[in-house]
Image (cartoon, rainbow, N blue to C red):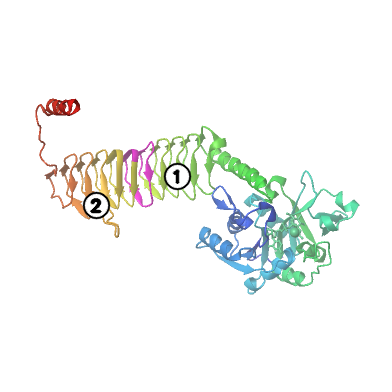
Amino acid sequence: MNFSSLAAVVLCAGKGTRMSSARAKVLHPLLGKPMGGYPISRALEVGASNVVVVVGHQSDEVKQVLRQVFPTQPLSFALQAPQHGTGHAVGCAEAALAEFRGAVLILSGDVPLLTRQTLQLLIEAYRASSGPLALLSFRPPDPTGYGRIVREGGRAKKIVEHRDASQAERKIDEVNAGVYLADAEFLFKAVKTLSPRNAQGELYLTDIVAQASEVAVVEAPAEEIAGVNDRAQLAALTKLLQQRINLAHMKAGVSMVSPETTFIDEGVEIGADTVLGPMVTLRDGSRLGREVTVGQGCVVTRSVIGDGVELKPYSVLDEAQVGARSFIGPFARLRPGSELAEGVHLGNFVETKKTKVGKGSKANHLAYLGDAVIGEGCNIGAGVITCNYDGVNKYVTTIGDRVFVGTDSQLVAPVTLGNDTFIAAGTTVTEDVPAGALTLSRPPQVNKEGWTERRRKVLDGMKKK
Ligand code: UD1
Ligand code: CA
């Protein structure tokens, strides 16, 4: 068969009534990615040059969310409204593939666990076959509800939906997975001939099987085909996906103290000999180096963590970069745009945002560092605050190298502290500090001796009256 090129159609128009949700089913997430994103990722991985997502229910929201997940990938959308069945859905994708010649992979938006390996077997079977169609079958523990694969002399001849099947056909335990690979020309010709004369009054995609000269069938592992119809299945599949992802990382040399409470999104990268404590969540494209320690309860999103970093418990990192051998937390919060060089120490209750911290600089306790550029070898004391916001605009604080900022100082931006400056504790810095200077803005201290005793006497006198 012609297999010069591959396109994909992902069916996402169905409502998902049993989710009891205001959201479209395909938008419910498994480990940080909407369900519909999984088949799209698989189609791209096996080389689809073009993925057409068929949308119907809440089409605008589905489009918007999937676009966000795949901002640069070759995705297009076809509207199916109203929905007249899976065959009608594929027909709606034809216009988007008008110029396309080759094989079309058809996937369901609510079957997230299908693996790349199984799709590759389907592709191989299609290539080896002389017919225009290959599909996946599987044997579920209970075939009720699925379309049965009817064979004659061993060859797949047609698919009969459960509701249309005879008693004898219902005994067939090999069922249709809803995953197909078809020659584009055959496919779009075949879907035009479909008729709704069946129990559901729909256009069944499955009816194209009877039109193919030969159908290649690949049996897939049942757990990969499991679909999501309700929230219990969503939770069960999330758990399976979690186990699959965690196992792959453990095989690649990552230790997990408690895999069952470790949640890692698909696509997160982790170097060997990294150790993850309990209740750790690593999300959305985060990349961790080798020999990183992630303490209990950390949540790391879209962040890059260098080799040998220690994230102490309950640190939350979002779009942050942490240089090698840095120490973060416990209870640190690194917000978007935090860029730490090597060997940085950020301790408990330190918050950074849009801030660069130079090599070996430390802020060990209770600080807010926002819109700042901090040099190398600095020591930022407890309670230091960059006052970056005047209620209207944000301003930058620039700190040179080897600067000491004493505890409880406020740096009112825009302001620059030169190299080797020393800010005394409790200083409010409002003007630039030249390199090498000591800055203090405290009023001189006054000691009134014997004051407590005099006050006591005054208070006693008032009581007696
Ligand atoms: C379908 C198959 C059945 C197979 C089963 C596997 C048909 C007729 N039957 O049945 O043989 O065993 O999948 O799970 O194809 N969708 C649309 N537009 C529509 C209808 C459905 O986009 O008009 C989408 C749904 O959102 C879903 C997918 O197509 O992602 C499958 O639809 P669904 O109604 O779940 O098909 P089944 O009845 O389960
Ligand atoms: Ca249906």
Residue 296 location (% of width, % of height): 46, 35
> Along the horizontal axis of the image, is 129 left or right of 117?
right
Task: Name the image quarter holding the C terminus.
Answer: top left
The numbered dot on residue 397 is 2
Look at the image and tell me whether residue 291 can be seen. Answer: no
Nearer the observer: mark 1 or 2; the answer is: 2
Q: Is mark 2 on a helix, strand or loop?
A: strand
Task: Name the image quarter holding the N terminus.
Answer: bottom right
Q: What is the span of residues highlighted in magenta in the rendered image?
A: 323-349
Compared with 336, 77 (above or below) is below
Q: In which quarter of the image is ligand 1?
A: bottom right
Q: Does the magenta stretch include residue 324?
A: yes
Near mark 2 (Cα within 10 A), the count class, few <14, some 14-19 or many ≥20, is: many
The numbered dot on residue 41 is none
Q: Which residue is drawn at 38% across and 51% down?
A: 336
* Viewer-nearest residue: 200 or 311: 200
What is the CA distance from the residue labelled 1 to the residue labelled 2? 26 Å
> Along the horizontal axis of the image, is 263 left or right of 454?
right
